[in-house]
Amino acid sequence: MSDDSDIDDVAHQTLLQSIHAPGTVKKNRLRKAAKTKIDASSLLSHITVSRPSTNKARQTLGIDDLESSEKSTEKNGKKRKSTAEASDGIASKKKLKSKTLIPLKDVEARKEIEGKIAFTDLKKEVTQNWTELVQSNRISDQLIFPLTKPDGIMWGDEKKEPVLTEKEMEVMKATDIKMAKERLSQMQRMRAIVGIQEAKNRYMNKIKSKGYHRILKREKRKQLLKEFDDLVTRDPSAAHEKLAEMDLQRIMERGSLKHRGQNQKFKQMLEKHASRNPEVKKLLDEHLRMGRELKAKVVSAADQSDDEEGVAAGSSQDKKRSIHDLLKDAAQEAEKESKKNIGAALLDSFLDDSEAQKVTLAQMRAKKRQEAAALRSISANTGPPQDEPLFDVDETWQKEEKKQKKQKKKEIKTKEMNRKGTIGKISFVDKNYDPKLEAEKLETFEEKVEKAVDLAGVHAAAKRQKEIELDPSKFLELNTNDLTQVSADFVEKMDQFDEETAQVINEAFKDDDVVGDFEQLKEGVKEKEKVKDIDLSLAGWGSWVGPGMTEKKRRQNFVIKAKAKKRRDGERNGLIIGESMTAKDGIGKIQPRSLPFPYSRVEDYEAVLKQPLGLEWNMEKMRDELCKPAVVVEAGRAIRPINKKHLLGE
Amino acid sequence: MKIKVISRNPNTYQRETTDQRNKIVRNFNTPADPFRAQVEYTRALNATKLERVFAKPFVASLDGHVDGVQVLAKHPNRPSQIYSGARDGTVKVWNLASRECQATIEAHRGLVNDISVDNNTGDNFVTVGQDSHLKYWKISSVVDGQQKVPAHSTPLDGIIYGVSHLSFSSDFVTCGEDISVWKPFRETPLRSYNLGTDTIHTCRANPVEENVIVGARSDRSIFVLDTRQDVPVKKVTMKMRPNKISWNPMEAYSFTVASEDFSLYTFDMRYMEHPTQSHQGFTSAVLDVDYSPTGQEFVAAGYDRSIRLFKARDMTSRDVYYTKRMASVLSVLWSADAKFVLSGSNEMNIRVWKANAAEKLGPLTKREKQAFAYNEKLRDTYKNHPEVRRIAKHRNVPRHIFTAAKEHKLIKDARARRDLRRAKAAGLDEEDSYLPQTQKVMVGDAEM
């Protein structure tokens, strides 16, 4: 009722207005229509489903409060309707909606708001569902397609059993994994058995042991005999034949000389050469004959000597004899060949008794040593021995001391005690050390040792030790003394060494003039990088100036002279600093000029480049891990998009 | 200057083996190899050169159409099955493995506007044509049974320009005067959305989120639709017409738009105010785009008679394919196993290309695989070195593309200079006035 009265009131007022100012009605209406504000609450009123986003939208638009306030006003204001009626815009809109069609613009606006809300919903949903996955995929090292879930179900596939044709079923049957495995294991077993047997046979054939073969032969013979015995009882004629056969076999074998041990090498040689080349064959035969002769037992000489000697007794006599004989034979041969004194002496010695032998042997040894010493001394005189070490650490002295021990044990003991006390343990080889002298004057050895020890400062050390005991302040002095002694010689040797290496290097680079080449190169670079004058002269330009202008002058007017630039390498030898090298044609050609996109620090990028990738610097597995492709796809296998239902478990 | 060095040939001191693999003696505490970096850099350089040497992307040409190939589609489960629709209304089904045409159907009068294959069972496909017909075809009967009549045909009162199946579903959406959601074999759509008077010339259903559809209208706007809602949820307008749209199958919210302004733009569905990335390189309008099923790359077809392959988040193209006789490319497709790319062009041919131009096809031995992986890794590691980059990026392109690219660069630079001068005159400094390409391509603010 009140509503009706309201409308009436409004209509009445407008009517009154129109009566008062008839020209303005239309205008007013138009203005009103243009100004009409669409109320958000009315637009959202049809959305019955309460969603968080809707509520949020309501809140942001401030409708929530309005509505609630509206409700409250409705509740409270029932009593004071009449007072609020005219001014309350909300109420009037409500009535408008109920009575008339909503203007098209309102519909559009409502759609817009609805769309906004739906979009925020959609945005939220999509973000929630996919952001994490997408981000992780974007930064992952490797993506493998088609996508599979952990349980092996393809994301794209539907859970359907594939329908197989009969042929496919047959193939499937044929490739039944269980049966195939069984068959495979059986075959493997068989192969293993065969292999083992083969290996055994091969091994048996390769056995070289004579004992084994002897046993084998004996067994075979026994077997044969057994068979033969059997045959004798059963079938005598056959046995006879068998016997004949066996005999024939034996004869054949003996005749062919197959039983003789011919080694592999001999056979090969025979095959290779002897069969073709008669000369080689002859040579081989000769060789064989010689070998046989050598192998044959030496009967006569040994017997004779046995008879002659016969004195020496004892259990080890036989052994001694044999060695003795051999030596004698060798000696005799030597005498025949070269008729040397040594040979004669040796022969004599063996003919004489053992004491005499020993004497002669000692003599010989001494002689030999002398010769060797002489040789060594010659080599020492001609030049420093290459292989000789620069320093002998105690060795020489130890040897000599051993010899001395027998004669002057006590003295040496004390000396050694002293030496233990010394600091500079290193001794160097005496240049005056003469092995020849040593060999000749064995008696003076002691003195020499004394001298050498003195030279090495052993005695001095001992003396000083005593002094130190008295006055500890001299300890330092001793130290320095020792060092200077060492360094002087050491430096000499080092110089020698340097000269040698320099010589070697010089020899290696004999034919190239490195310095000259470099200088030439530098000149070339200088010439190339010289700043050039700019010639701007053009034909005819400047020629009209008048008398006194020569061609040369005219040219000079148009030449911009280059400023002489000081080179950075200057007059320094052995150095070229390229001036024309810009970033583009120098190192810039192979070095990145800026930090590439994903990196924010140079260190990170360098670290990536420093990681070796090749097999030379990595194990194979590591290489594979480093070089795994970013995207893996299987040819002929369809890749389907991510299946939301499978992924989100809906 | 001469430097004498000692070098040894491994053959002189290593013993001969049958497979030429020598035992590697290893010291587990090796000092760092001083020449390691040099050796690997050289190898990377060589690998890059070899990659260019072996880059022969063209595989085959599927010919049989007698008019320009307007649309290409793939089967979701069968990687070898390809569908192509021509401007004369024929639809052909191809077997990619044998490069044979399995079926030819006179599907429509006038050109075939779009083809889409069922995403649930994969049993049938839908074609729409300029003759205002929507036709269902059963794949088995078309391919094997030689039955050339549709399983179902629906005449409509307006031309349908695009059709796309919802993700893992037999339902599909069509676009034309409005957007409609259909269930298969029904005479009327399930739901229709009227977006205004402008024609909707393309629409694509999200391959991951089953309710989301994105489309483009002839007023140069792109809209997002949620099939659970009564109204479209988002609409933005570009300066130039978006020709085709393709969703990234691995990222539920990003899609790429092939634009008339020689570029492609990747949008994030959630933040549509401006694209997240622009993809440049074409010298003419981009007519079609299709994502690789891996979601890492996409291929685009240009009116400039070339196709370009882009990495999904790169600005410049990874590769460009063209042949002498290829006319403007109307449609492209990335095969379902991500190994091949197909292009249908105006001169009636469908061309098959390798997705990676230098890839060796067929089965590989383990050592080959390892060698390829090593080379690839080297190329990737040293790709920012100037020499390597120069070789890897260099492409010989036809003269018309080369000159057009040069000209476009000139224009672009001139515009940039002009903008800078204007900004300076207005009292702005360089950094403030700079706007990336992605922010220049939209008109006004986003609506809805």
Image: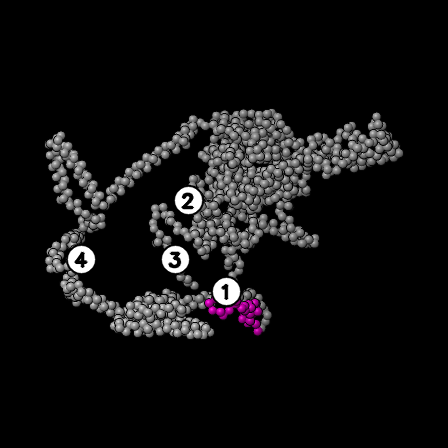
* Chain-order first, disc 1 or disc 4: 4
Q: Nearer the viewer, residue A412 or B356?
A: A412
Left or right, B175 with reference to A64: left
Mark 2 and mark 1: Cα distance apart in space: 46 Å
Say which amino acid is labelled 3. Answer: Ser
Examine the rendering and report whether any part of residue B6 can be seen.
Answer: yes
* Count of marks overlaid on the render: 4
Separation of marks 3 and 4 at Cα, in angstroms:
60 Å
Residues at marks 4 and 2, common chain?
no
Discs 3, 4: same chain: no
- The residues bearing labels 1 and 4 have C-alpha atoms spaced at a distance of 85 Å
| Residue assigned mark 4 | A320
Chain under label 4? A
Q: CA distance from mark 3 to mark 2?
A: 27 Å
Label placed on residue B7: 3
- Residue at the limit of the structure toward the right, as seen here: A20
Query: Please, what is the three-letter code of the amino acid marked with disc 2?
Result: Arg
In front: label 4 or label 2: 4
Q: Which residues are magenta?
A: A548-576
Say whether mark 4 and mark 1 are on the same chain. Answer: yes
Q: Nearer the viewer, mark 1 or mark 3?
A: 3
User: Foreground residue, B359 or B307?
Assistant: B359
Q: Residue at x 54, y 40 (%)?
A: B295
Q: Where does the image place residue B374, in percent across and percent down from the top left?
A: 46, 47
Give the vertical position of B74 relative to A214 (above or below): above
Task: Label 2, secondary structure: give it.
Answer: helix
The residue labelled by disc 2 is: B367
Which mark is on residue A577?
A: 1
